Amino acid sequence: MRLALFAGLMLAATSATAQQENLVVQHADGAILRALDTSTGKLLDIDIGTGQTLKFERLEITLSDCRYPEENPSSDAFAYLTIRDIRETDPRFEGWMVASSPALSAMDHPRYDVWVLRCRIPEAEASTGD
């Protein structure tokens, strides 16, 4: 039983690896993020360019990169973000956020939430992904 379970898990991992190897990603020139102040309920969609830093209340948000699958541009986004509370020296978050799984790599802040909605992509590419 354990051997069969192990073999099944190995087969699934091999299939996932093969799919990842065939995945071609594109770099976008920006991303669309959503920010929430949980105390006031203020919600804001943020259009941010790669290399740009924007402010949302007490947060400074920097986008280093946004990538999306070439075959289906509207399906997912992976954004590398650095988010800092202006009252602190160390970032509250630094790393990749995934649009389809925001809880997978989330910012830990008592008041604010920030997550990725999508990469900013040309309209022609977005319409071919549907």
Image (cartoon, rainbow, N blue to C red):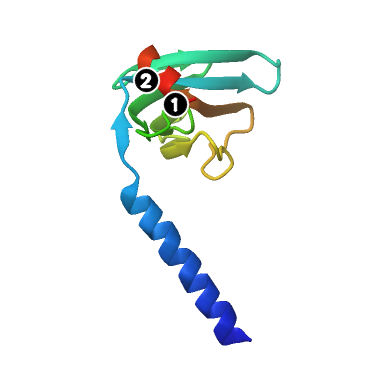
Q: Is residue 31 visible?
A: no
Is the residue under label 1 in contact with that under label 2 (CB below 8 Å)? yes
| Amino acid type for the residue under numbered disc 2 | Glu
- From the image, tell me which residue sits under label 1: 129
Q: Circle 2 sits in a helix, a strand or a loop, which is it? A: helix
- What is the quadrant of the N terminus in the image? bottom right
**The one of 63 and 123 positioned closer to us in this rendering:** 123
Which percent across, then down, holds residue 105? 51, 43
- From the image, tell me which residue sits under label 2: 125
**Which residue is painted at 53% across and 29% down in the image?**
115
Neighbor class of circle 2 (other Cα within 10 Å; few <14, some 14-19, many 20+) is some
**Which residue is painted at 32% across and 49% down in the image?**
22
**The one of 91 and 124 positioned closer to us in this rendering:** 124
Residue 25 horizontal side relative to residue 34, left or right: left
**The one of 2 and 18 positioned closer to us in this rendering:** 18
The label on residue 102 is none
In the image, is residue 24 above or below residue 31? below
| Amino acid type for the residue under numbered disc 1 | Gly
Residue closest to the far right: 40
